Amino acid sequence: MSTFLVNLSGLVLMALIVWWFWLSSKGRATQHSGGVIDIMVDHGVYEPAVIKTAAGATLQLRFERRDASPCAEQVVFHGLDVSETLAIGEVTTVTLTPTQPGTYRFTCQMQMYQGTLIVE
Ligand SMILES: [Cu+2]
């Protein structure tokens, strides 16, 4: 009986951890109508990774690359024909004016870094 309880509490803990990570990555969609947004590039994630904006508004995405690994060096906006090389330790501004509503992914060239741009 006691091992069952230990296993159960382990499962509950795992579920909480998964839930917390899921919320922390998916729950931070920030709503914008254009403007300047700072995005941190570190530890394999864009932060924030989900950006919502309005169609026709101009966004200035300021990518601050802290990750020195070659993986992080490029950001590619799929479906928008935009890509940019990010310098280590610097802020690189990507200016976009998406006109078509939709969901666009932005990733590194190997697609390990994953982000989503939602245009409404
Ligand atoms: Cu990569």
Image (spheres, rainbow, N blue to C red):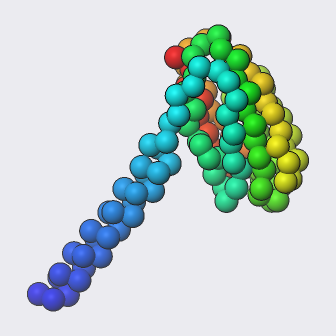
Residue 36 percent across, percent down from the top left: 70, 29
Residue at image x 68%, y 42%?
A: 39
| 15, above or below 45, in the image | below
The percent coordinates of residue 76 (x first, y second) are 75, 35
- In the image shown, does 12 or 111 lie closer to the viewer? 12
Look at 84% across and 54% down and name the residue there: 89
Q: In this view, does 86 lie to the left or right of 76?
A: right
Question: In the orientation shown, which residue stands out farthest toward the front?
Answer: 35
Place of residue 14 in the rendered image (x, y in percent of width and height, measured from the top left): 35, 68
The answer to whether 58 is drawn above or below residue 90 in the figure is: above
Instruction: Give the x, y percent position of residue 67.
Output: 77, 57
Is residue 56 visible in this depiction of the protein?
yes
Residue at position x 50%, y 48% in the image = 25
User: What is the quadrant of the N terminus in the image?
Assistant: bottom left
Number of numbered discs present?
Answer: 0
Instruction: Quadrant for residue 106, please give it.
Output: top right
Q: Residue 54 sits in which quadrant?
A: top right
For residue 111, side relative to residue 22 (left or right): right
Give me the residue at 53% from left, 34% from top.
30
Horizontally, residue 17 falls left or right of residue 30, namely left
Q: Is 73 placed above or below 3 here?
A: above
Farthest left residue in view: 1
